[in-house]
Amino acid sequence: MARLTTDSPYSNQELLMNLAYAKDDEAYLRLRPDEKLCDYVADCCVDHHCACMTPELVMEDGLMDCTPCPISLLYSLAIQAAELRTVLKLFEDSEEAGKLYADWISTADRMPPVAEPVLIARRAEYGRPLIVEQGILLPGGVWKTFGHKFKNIPFWMPLPAPPEEGEV
């Protein structure tokens, strides 16, 4: 499966997933890589005559507590996105990520037996990440999940073994 984090986003989806990032314990926006996020937000507050804008709020990360301010809300979201991206990137760079995706089989390489339940990874609507669910391959190359049928499923894997009687 493709990585979600990248340092050079190509598509709008990749840019959205990687817009905010952390570097040297500071948050940045990819579109303004030379300016710290808190400095950019402070400038936005000044430009929009934000009532809660004070140097103390910016310096102590208090902008996240300015509830009526939409700039504050966007700042909070960007900070959280940068932190989440950092953790996700660490995971994607780890050996565990490789193990997680190792069992997935590309449908371009091999198909499962017809009518055998398997896990499938399918693309969601509107460019969202892959969805994993149980499905079966029907004759004619159509995949069926609970109430839906799909033509293009990129990955599948056998179902894991059920737990032993004593493990439940």
Image (cartoon, rainbow, N blue to C red):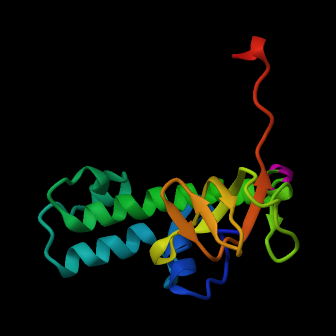
Assess whether residue 19 is covered by the magenta stretch.
no
Q: Which residues are magenta?
A: 95-99
The rendered magenta stretch, by its main secondary structure, is classed as helix
Name the residue rendered at 49%, 76% in the picture: 16
Name the residue rendered at 51%, 85% in the picture: 12
Residue 93 coordinates in the image, percent (x, y): 79, 60
Residue 70 is left or right of residue 134, and the answer is left
Residue 57 coordinates in the image, percent (x, y): 28, 55
Residue 44 is left or right of residue 86, and the answer is left
> 106 and 97: which one is in front?
106
Corner quadrant of residue 131: bottom right
Residue 70 coordinates in the image, percent (x, y): 21, 66
Q: Residue furthest top?
A: 166
> 146 and 58: which one is in front?
146
> 145 and 94: which one is in front?
145
Residue 21 visible within the image: no
> 92 and 154: which one is in front?
154
Corner quadrant of residue 120: bottom right
Residue 105 against residue 65 in the figure, above or below: below
